[in-house]
Amino acid sequence: MSSLAAIAATSAPGFSHLVTVEDSLKGTQAIPPDRARHFCAELEAGHIVFLPVSPIAISQEDRELLLGRKQTSSAYHKNIAYRPAEDRITGLDASEQAEADSLRRILQEFSKRSVEFLAGFLSPYAGKWKLDYASYRPIEEEGRSARLHARNDLLHFDSFPTRPTNGARILRFFVNLNPMKSRVWLTSETFESFGPRFARAGSMLASAAGNPVTRGMRSFARTLRLPFGSRPPYDEFMHRCHNAMKEDASFQEHTPKQRWEFPPDSAWMVFTDCVSHAVLSGQYALEQTFQIPQSALVESQISPLAILEKIAGQPLTL
Ligand SMILES: [Fe+2]
């Protein structure tokens, strides 16, 4: 397979831009449907919608609890996840259970407020999404050690290895809770620009004959000793793409990049399945993930699923 760097160098890239929401929005305040649709279209095209002031109210007491745990807690080696459907948190050590109730309540509240805000801000998606996990990210990202495929500081498109989306898109809403420091991201090409080249150049889609995607997926599944069909072909592809990007040091070094700084108390949202992103630095962010089904998208023809199915010439979902 060609190296990702070589692929990146051979075609015109499409990149993200920042869509700043100038008016300060609060809580459940809805925006007109046309404007909501505009923001959905910008997000689906791989752009970043940025709110200089977070619309989510978080009390001073809760902020202090979140920011103050760092000196005493060994759980700060990990992110803390909140599962809304089960109303429970994961990522705490046994010794952290005394704080579990407070954290669960704070993340439950954040998740609820995020849902309320996005229901009014991105109304075409409201009620159609699948509410995924929320998370609290208390660890300084700069210099954070992690295994290669889990590293946040390497450019990638998001793919959930244990929670296949079967073609639904991954929308993430972030708030920088840090009172002093920006959260710094790099982004590179969007999936619309990068994905087709990767799909065509990669071994999975290299052959023009037969059903190359299916064959590639079977081969890939065999390599991993997975029963074929344990994940939809779409998720298999996105997961392989995620790993290949992180494994390619040359791509990481040479691909063109943009740098973004999200200041304290700002919020931003991104479809992280089409914005290749890396987190360079930052500590104390809250995040809520939504899975947006194809049927709710305003520009479904540019979704990663639609792009890949056009190349494959066949459905990639189950
Ligand atoms: Fe990511």
Image: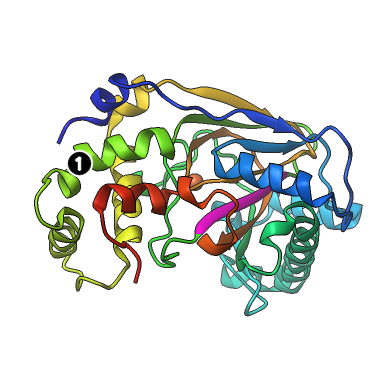
Give the quadrant of the C terminus.
bottom left
Give x and y (percent) for residue 61. 89, 56
Side of 53 where 247 appears, left or right: left
Q: Is residue 196 above or below residue 70?
A: above
Give x and y (percent) for residue 263. 74, 31
Give x and y (percent) for residue 297. 58, 55
Which quarter of the picture shows residue 7?
top left
Q: Residues within 10 Å of mark 1 (few under 14, many from 20)?
A: many
Give the magenta-colored segment's residue range.
169-175
Amino acid carrying mark 1 in the image: Gly
Question: Residue visible at 20% across and 41% down?
Answer: 202
Question: Residue visible at 65% across and 41% down?
Answer: 283
Q: Is residue 242 above or below residue 220?
A: above
Residue nearer the viewer, 110 or 74:
110
| CB at disc 1 and ligand 1 closer than 8 Å | no
Question: Residue visible at 20% across and 70% down?
Answer: 228
Identify the residue position indicated by label 1 in the image. Answer: 202
Tell me the SS state at disc 1: loop
Side of 317 where 221 appears, left or right: left
Q: Residue furthest bottom?
A: 86
Give x and y (percent) for residue 227. 19, 73
